[in-house]
Amino acid sequence: MTDEEVAAVVADLALAAELVDMAAPPPAVVQVDTDDDVIIATAVAGSADVLCTRDAHLHEASVIAYCVQRGIRVMDDRQLLTELRAADSTENGGLTPSP
């Protein structure tokens, strides 16, 4: 990606992002990589619908169960993109725009 493309992506993310306050240390959720606990805690604090990641530790059954109990689905980028395209196709009368 060019510097301009990166800047555009960052600007788009800033529009959609929500800053959350992490007042307390995160609970231990990701047993094999405790550095990932803050990611889960941020998603919970921000009332995320989806946690999009390719981090294998965040796709472990216990982590997914923890997230599901809090209304968060854990998906990788391909799963999310497929779902977004399907939703867009439905909203546009079955027409999916070119990538």
Image (cartoon, helix red, strand yellow):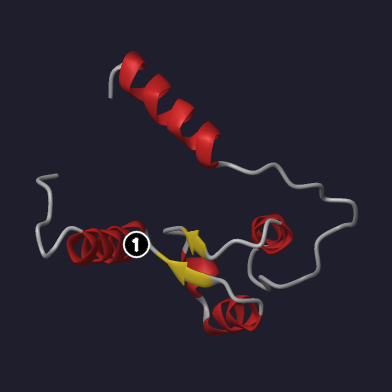
- Read off the residue under disc 1: 80
Is 57 placed above or below 98 here?
Answer: below
Q: Position of residue 92 (x, y in %)?
A: 17, 58
Asked whether, in this view, residue 79 is left or right of residue 27, the answer is left
Residue drawn at (50%, 72%) of the image: 73
Report the residue that reaches farthest toward the right.
Answer: 24
Q: Is residue 89 left or right of residue 42?
A: left
Instruction: Please tell me how crowded label 1 is: few (under 14), some (14-19), or many (20+) other residues with Cα within 10 Å.
Output: some
Vertical placement of 54 versus 12: above or below? below
Q: Is residue 83 left or right of residue 69?
A: left
Extreme-top residue of the structure:
3
Q: Nearer the viewer, residue 9 or 95?
A: 95
Q: Quadrant of residue 43?
A: bottom right
Percent x, y of residue 31: 68, 73
Residue at the (77%, 70%) spot, across then down? 28
- Give residue 37's quadrant in the image: bottom right
In percent of width and height, residue 62 lies at: 60, 83
| Relative to 93, 57 lies left or right | right
| Mark 1 residue type | Leu
Give the residue drawn at x 53%, y 68%.
57
Report the quarter where the N terminus lies: top left
Quadrant placement of the C terminus = top left
Q: Secondary structure at mark 1?
A: helix
User: Looking at the rendering, which quadrant does residue 7 occupy?
Assistant: top left
Q: Is residue 68 above or below residue 75?
A: below
Q: Nearer the viewer, residue 63 or 20?
A: 20
| Number of numbered tags placed on the structure image | 1
